[in-house]
Amino acid sequence: MVWKPGHYLLLALALYSLVVTLGFSLRGRQLAGLRQEMGVLSQRAALAPEGYVLPLPGACLPTRPENLPGAPRPYRKGVSAGFVFIQGDACVPVVRGMGVVAAQAGEVVRVDLDHKEPSPEEYQKLLEAVREGASPEQMDLLRGLEVWLRHPDGRITVYAHLQAPYPGLRVGKRVFRGDPIGYVGNTGLNGGAPRLLFEVWEGEPDRSPFLFQGLPQEELLRQAKAFFGLE
């Protein structure tokens, strides 16, 4: 049998009648429980993985090697764990105060509401301290003001060097893909051009692999285009 639009309409009406009939037959407590369950299911559907997008609307992937995951960072004997969006390598202007959005739906697990930039002297001491490698706590200082989101697939995205978080953003808040979460800045850099460091971790930042870790540049860009829906 070939289904036609009229068949779908009849099916929808039949299901609606069934729901209404069940609603009248259930007691008040049962009906309230059903409504609560439907509400939970609706929330889960709204937060279901729908694919990731880049955190700067209209941006493209950086192409300079130093702005890609895995790029060496000799000053701390490490590598970059994410994409660096900076003026001239993002396909959009990257300026202070530019809006940053959630790459996917999720829950806010960190937002630096009381960030304080180190003095030049403190910053130099930090660079001395990380010369042989940086701990997760030191990496937080180097990333400046951050927002972290945990997503339904278990990944955590990190948005760093922000000027400020979006007003009202708090730990535990649910956000949808494309919701504003902060503004481009240059915190954690002791000056320098505004930029956004965007990291995608398979689990806890600095304690799990980062996305595309170990891939050569050509393969990294190929997989990243597919991952962010840019193909």
Image (cartoon, rainbow, N blue to C red):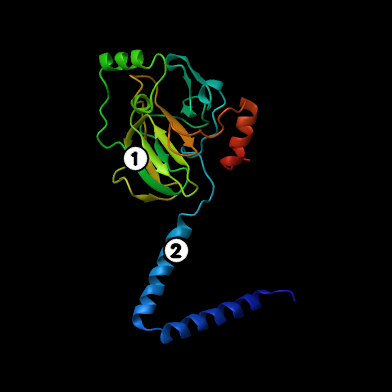
Residue 160 percent coordinates (x, y): 39, 31
Residue 2, by quadrant, is bottom right
| Element under disc 1 | strand
Q: Disc 2 on helix, strand or loop?
A: helix
User: For the point 47% across and 20% down, which residue is it?
Assistant: 78
Residue 139: x and y in percent read 38, 26
The residue depicted at 51 percent of the width and 35 percent of the height is: 59
Q: Position of residue 224 (x, y in %)?
A: 58, 36
Q: Name the residue under label 1.
A: 110
Depicted 124 relative to depicted 40: above or below: above
**Residue extending furthest toward the right:** 1
Front-most of 89 and 188? 188
Q: Which three-letter amino acid code belongs to the residue tagged 1?
A: Arg
Q: Is any part of residue 158 visible from this angle?
A: yes
**x and y percentages locating residue 168 in the rendered image:** 29, 46
Badge 1 local density, few (<14 within 10 Å), some, or many (20+)?
some
Q: Is residue 48 above or below residue 42?
A: above
Q: Is 226 placed left or right of 188 in the picture?
A: right
- Lower sequence index among marks 1 and 2: 2
Determine crowd level at label 2: few under 14, some 14-19, many 20+ residues with C-alpha closer than 10 A.
few
Say which residue appears at 61% left-offset and 80% top-offset.
10
**To which residue does mark 2 refer?**
42
